[in-house]
Image: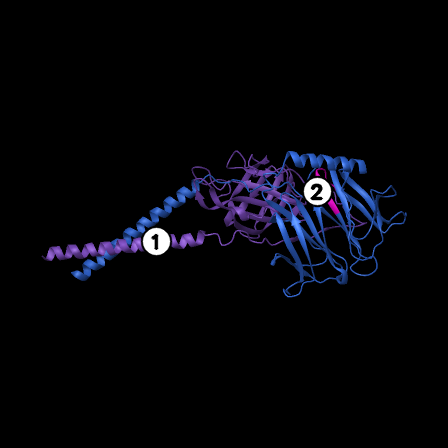
Chain colours: A blue, B purple
Amino acid sequence: MKKLMSLLGTLALAFAFILPVSADGHENAMVRVLHASPDAPAVDVYVDGEVAVEGAEFKDLTDYLTLPAGDYNVEIKPAGDAETVVVAADLSIEAGKFYTAAAIGQLENIEIAAMEDDANFEDGKSKVRVAHFAPDAPAVDVAPKGGDPLFSNLEFKAVSDYGTLDAGTYDLEVRPAGATDVVKALDGVALEGGKNYTAFAIGLLEGEPAFEVLLAADGGEMAMAPETGQGGLAQTASMNWLLAAAVVGAAAAGFYVFRRQKQDA
Amino acid sequence: MERQRLDSTSFVVRSKTLKLVFLGTIGFLVWSAQAEAPEKSFIMPKAEFAEPLVLTSKQVDRQSFHSNSFVPSRLVIPSIDVDTSIEAVGKDEAGRMDTPSNVNQVGWYQYGAKAGATGNVVLSGHLDDLNGPAIFANLGQLPIGEVVTLQQDDQVATYEVASVKQYRLDQVPLASIFAATQAKRIQLITCAGPYDEKLGYRDRIVVTAHLIETK
């Protein structure tokens, strides 16, 4: 897997040189936010002082937002309380790339973890990674039921590299690193070909909200808005408008002339 | 003498009328110029949420992704008299989502989601052609809560309109339309706003509808 990953990395790099900036990505980057802090309240997320996400609760994952590439200051505040900053971080985002920013850890140690999401897709394959955002859980392995780990020894805050799997439905399990007992069984995980995924392990092993795993599709094939008109309607519309204006104008002129003549008479 | 006075009066009146029309025109131009002036180069987009897919150990339907999703071949929106076939499209050389070659059909973005699947199912349709209205001429009038269906033979995915929004071209929330999402929704796009010979239409209308049923 490691070899494959580094090969993929090389390929990705090669592609990056051949295609400097994709035309469809514009100058924009795509960013989404995950609330993974189990005991934090609902929050608002501010980007450079402007609110971008309102009322995100634990386990909420936003859609991607389009932001011009550049450097941003991200602040997380309790929902509706613009004065209090729970945690802040600087984020540098590049054009055409996808990112996930997650608020992780328990409230007293809350921090923002930012990661780049893979938006290069492979036909018939799924690229998958695991993010360990469950603060009280030990280091874990993620493996097919009874099999060898696909992802090993992930500690809290760790985000694995993407691994490539054949599209299909898998029965997986989360285990303490190196052990065979099962922390969490994940049955029937459906991975679609040509899509990439992040599995976020969140929550608390002991206490509430309980430990669980979210599966999110990553990235996307961006495009610019389609050109969906040729102006036929606009020309008719403006013709109609001109015609209407002419009628109104003529009527008004006639009325004034008529009144004046009446007054003079 | 009498005759001349009347003439001069009616001249004054006429010019007054002209003045009114003139002032009105100026006023309209000033007003429309103000309306056209971009208030701000960048407006912070607001994120929307979708329910995340929680993986569990007891999934009854095993999250099967292929059973209920399909490549749509027909779009039906009864409330605006749309019943048309669908052409799969990609991107044009400028990196824009492509449009169908027939202006009375709609284009389905083949890099997005299939009908009924998790993600954005994106459809583009023309507002007009060179001569008059095309398939999505009335998209902007689509009421919230109306039903939109995608079909392929006997498979049907039914969606309910949640929002109808108009954006300046440079403020269309592209990531909400084209990037991955946990939501199961369709995004219908057409042109809107003033038309410019060189730049085309200034705005885009985006209709978002959420999946309510597949069969």
> Which quadrant of the structure image shows residue B5?
bottom left
- Can see residue A5? yes
The image position of residue A85, as x and y in percent, is 67, 63
Q: Which residue is mark 1?
A: B26
The image position of residue B92, as x and y in percent, is 56, 35
Drawn side of residue A38 relative to residue B85, left or right? right
Drawn side of residue B100 relative to residue A258, left or right? right
Q: Secondary structure at mark 2?
A: loop
- Can see residue A124? no
Disc 1 to disc 2: CB gap under 8 Å:
no
What number is the disc on residue A264? none
- Magenta residues (range): A191-198
Number of other residues with Cα within 10 Å of mark 1, as a class: few under 14, some 14 to 19, many 20 or more: few
Which residue is at the front of the view, B18 or B37?
Answer: B37
The image position of residue A192, as x and y in percent, is 72, 40
Q: Chain of mark 1?
A: B
Q: Chain of mark 2?
A: A
| Residue at x-position 65% and y-position 56% | A74
* Residue type for callout 2: Asp
| Residue at x-position 49% and y-position 42% | B127
- Looking at the figure, which quarter contains the N terminus of chain A? top right
Q: Which residue is mark 2?
A: A118
| Residue at x-position 70% and y-position 40% | A195
* Residue type for callout 1: Ile
Which residue is at the front of the view, A134 or B39?
Answer: B39
| Magenta portion: prevailing SS class | strand
Drawn side of residue B36 relative to residue B120, left or right? left
Instruction: Determine if the magenta segment contains residue B66.
Output: no
- Looking at the figure, which quarter contains the C terminus of chain A? bottom left
Drawn side of residue B7 relative to residue B88, left or right? left
Query: How far apart in space, not on screen, are marks 1 and 2 (Cα)?
Result: 54 Å
The image position of residue A264, as x and y in percent, is 17, 61
